[in-house]
Image: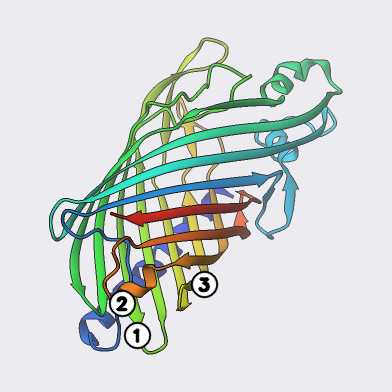
Amino acid sequence: MNNITGVVGQYFQIVIEGVGIFFLLTLLMCPNLFGQIAEFVPEGVNLATVDTTRKTYDGYLNATSSASSALDVYLNRNGISEGDIDGSISYEKTNVQFLYQFGLLKTVNLGIAIPYIQNKRNSDIKVIEASQSDFADSIDSAESSGFGDIKLWGLWRVFYTDQADFQLGLALKGDNAPLNSDNYDKLPLGNGSKELTLFLRTHVYSIQSSLKLSLEIQQLMTEDVDIKLNDGQTVAKTQSNSLLGTLDLSGNSGALRYGGGLKMESIGNQKLDGVSQQNGYLSYTLRGLVAFGNLNLLEHQSIGNPWEARLEVEKVISGLNAPNSQSLSIGVLTYF
């Protein structure tokens, strides 16, 4: 299945990059057709955002997009018979995040994101085969809370007119939050390693129809590190590169904005001392958005303190080895 994930991920990488090139050419060839609203901060201006995202799941999607329970997936990954352990597992994760972005130059922004995470696993496990008690302990109920990995980023506005916007960015996520790989009772708050993300954003906006089309592509690279397991053993952790692409369409009517789109995420397998953990996946997610505020009025007039409150929902609809998750986000942003 991992080979299938890799092939399909590469295919969609080509498709998404092709779509990105198409829209960029559209911007360059037809500049009078579009305007845009993008979260890029003018020089000397600040942008602050606070949002809360709650994500839940209790199963995984397989190649036929049918769901398998989380417990069945874990037993299969570890070569354990389904008759040895019975019960169910579910996950809840709440991420409260503060983001600050500053317009350093006319075409350059700098930003920081600080998350506070509550991570919980609800486990109702019954051990049938006593020899699997240690594994059952590793998937028992657990939770943790605290600050997650801090992210710093820079954003370069490569191409911009009142009709179009094209941006390139670079983000670095630290490893300040605990991975908790040596403690079954606590879930991870961070990835245990630094991450480097390259991304591009393209926005096109039709003033006549008030429709905005947004495309973003991210390439994620993770450093190799040594981590300590619960049994005291130290192993080398590596992760294959990952790819994320989103395509959204939104419109507005006065202070109300609404829209939706599709997200594709290809996450590489993690390896411990060269042994694949079979946890890479490919997922396709539907997204929906409703927002209210005066941000849209910037297209027509000067606003003293632009702001917007947002409600976003996401649901994984298809994938390979992907968490069958759903999430709800509520956030507020303001320029000052």
Residue at x 25% of width, y 63% of height: 167
Q: Residues within 10 Å of mark 2 (few under 14, many from 20)?
A: few
Mark 3, other Cα within 10 Å: few <14 / some 14–19 / many ≥20? some
The residue to which callout 2 is attached is 299
Numbered badge on residue 51 = none
**Furthest residue toward top:** 232
Kindly identify which residue carries mark 3.
258
Is 322 rendered above or below residue 310? above
In the rendered image, the vertical position of residue 285 relative to residue 95, given as above or below: below
Residue for point 61% across, 49% down: 321
Q: Do the residues bearing badges 1 and 3 touch, measured as CB atoms within 8 Å? A: no
- Give me the C-alpha separation between circle 1 and circle 3: 15 Å
The residue most toward the front is 304
Residue 218 drawn at (x, y percent): 36, 55
- Where is residue 323? Give x, y as percent: 62, 48
Most distant residue in the left direction: 105
Q: What amino acid does circle 1 point to?
A: Ile
Numbered tag placed on residue 207 in the rendering: 1
